[in-house]
Amino acid sequence: MAQTLNLTITADVLTPAELSADEARCWQAAQAATDHAYAPYSHFHVGAALLLDDDSIVWNTNQENAAYPSGLCAERTVLFGLNNQPGRTVKLMAVAARPQHGDFVAVTSCGACRQVMQESESRQGQAIPLLLPGPNGTIWRFRSLTDLLPFQFMSDVLPARG
């Protein structure tokens, strides 16, 4: 007999004024990063920022390429770039997006980014809160990157290496 599985994902819906000081810094860094996106094909600028355990912020952007799909999303560029800082812990992640000549819009991360985000959180061994742009200038705050991908592909299903 079939069973129904119900999932609940909780996100706080905030205004910019309701962000903590650290959240506001990370959010503003993600927004500012969009100015540096390389998006000559989609004209859609995405910035991602990480607040690290030493209170520094690192950011990166989407990078497109004429040999599509050789580009990379902002979420993955910033998380992969973190490998240059071994031992760092991510306290918070923020993602912002807008058309090249427009206002910020509500978006969520693509599936590939969600998988990378989840594995980054898993490697770290603790939740990474996430800020995403919501509708009408709101900000969605998730308590964990895993909230965006409840059925992630996990390394424990891979065959053991000998």
Image (spheres, rainbow, N blue to C red):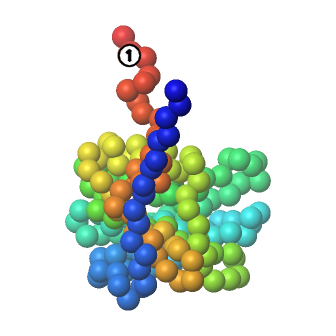
Q: Quadrant of residue 42?
A: bottom right
Label 1 neighbour load within 10 Å: few <14, some 14-19, many 20+ = few
Identified at 42% across, 33% down, the residue is: 154
Residue closest to the eye, 26 or 10: 10
Number of disc labels: 1
The percent position of residue 147, horizontal first and vertical second, equals: 42, 54
Q: Quadrant of residue 46?
A: bottom right
Element at label 1: loop
10 lies left or right of 77: left
- In the picture as drawn, the residue positioned furthest to the bottom comes out as 17
Q: Looking at the image, is 81 positioned above or below residue 141?
A: above
Identified at 49% across, 35% down, the residue is: 3
The percent position of residue 50, horizontal first and vertical second, equals: 38, 64
The percent position of residue 63, horizontal first and vertical second, equals: 62, 59
- In the picture as drawn, the residue positioned furthest to the front comes out as 1
The percent position of residue 94, horizontal first and vertical second, equals: 43, 68
Identified at 44% across, 22% down, the residue is: 158
Q: Is residue 10 in sight in this rendering?
A: yes
Identified at 34% across, 61% down, the residue is: 143
128 lies left or right of 104: left
Tell me the residue that label 1 is attached to: 160
Q: Is residue 81 in sight in this rendering?
A: no
Residue closest to the eye, 108 or 71: 108
Q: Looking at the image, is 66 positioned above or below residue 48?
A: above
- In the picture as drawn, the residue positioned furthest to the top comes out as 162
> Looking at the rendering, in which quadrant would you find the C terminus?
top left
Amino acid type at mark 1: Ala
